[in-house]
Image: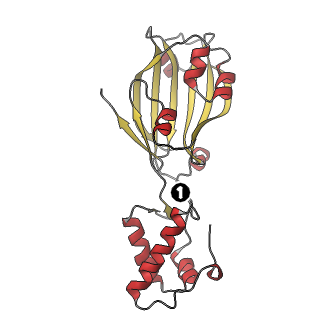
Amino acid sequence: MSSSPTDRPTLHDRRGASTLWRAVAERIEQDIRSFRYKPGERLPTEFELAEIFNVHRNTIRRAMNVLRERNLLRIEQGRGTFVKERMVRHTLGPKTRLTAALRDIDRLGERRFIGSSRIRVTEDIAKALRVARNRFVRKVDTLTVVDGFVVSMSSSFFPLPRFEGIEALIEETGSFSQSWQRLGVADYQRREAHITAVALPREDAEILSMARGQPAIFITNINVDMDDIPIVVSYTRIAPQHMQLVVRFD
């Protein structure tokens, strides 16, 4: 979003450089807190802001430094200055779910179904699900959207024929746990979680609003039922600017 000089009151009535940069910082902060500039949105350049406020670029630069110190802005080299996203704090524990975490902090989030396919297992998936290499699984692709921003994308693999039809249930409910329950899994727990960093293909990086070459958090989760039988292995790619992971040991 960009503004024009005509839709803002002039700052010419202010006197002194210190007053000017404070006034600019206050105006931009007001726009951020009122969502005129939205989380993740790129701000105009220093040159453009100098024209908008009719001040020197040094005044803009000082105001922007103050806003970064207030944790309102972030810089991406080669891309510009962005409004800092409200970080989602997601705890990884035996049964934690992102949807529950969002409810606890009053954030608007959803799991969005984007596709499904029936595929033969790879060696890694067969090992994680403890099935033979000739078996088939149901692959379900989903996005997690928080406050209108895609914060993660997941590919989840469910063993067949046990979870035949789970893709329709996930699309209907937006919930893995509800879908499992309707297919006879009363409860579950996370058995393993592997966390690493990966470079994403261009399309995935664009979906997550990540800069080219910026590493994503990559989590492999294996969930099991109460008989310790694997029910899903999922590969989740997370935009680090949107989410903070906390690992709990209790």
Residue nearer the viewer, 170 or 81? 170
Q: Position of residue 247 (x, y in %)?
A: 35, 34
The answer to whether residue 41 shows anywhere in this view is yes
Q: Position of residue 57 (x, y in %)?
A: 47, 83
Q: Which residue does the image show at 68% across and 27% down from the upper left?
A: 172
Q: Could you classify mark 1 by the number of other residues whose Cα lies within 10 Å: few (under 14), some (14-19), or many (20 or more)?
A: many
Specify the quadrant that holds the N terminus: bottom right
Give the tally of numbered discs.
Answer: 1
- Residue 104 sits above or below residue 94 on the image: below
Q: Which residue does the image show at 62% across and 30% down from the upper left?
A: 174
Q: Which residue does the image show at 61% across and 15% down from the upper left?
A: 182
- Residue 69 sits above or below residue 211 on the image: below
Q: Which residue does the image show at 67% across and 28% down from the upper left?
A: 171
Residue nearer the viewer, 212 or 11? 11
Q: Which residue is mark 1?
A: 39
Residue nearer the viewer, 101 or 44? 101
The answer to whether residue 144 shows anywhere in this view is no
93 relative position to 117: left or right: left
Rendered image quadrant of residue 173: top right
Helix, strand, or loop for circle 1? loop
Farthest-out residue, left: 250
Residue nearer the viewer, 95 or 106? 106
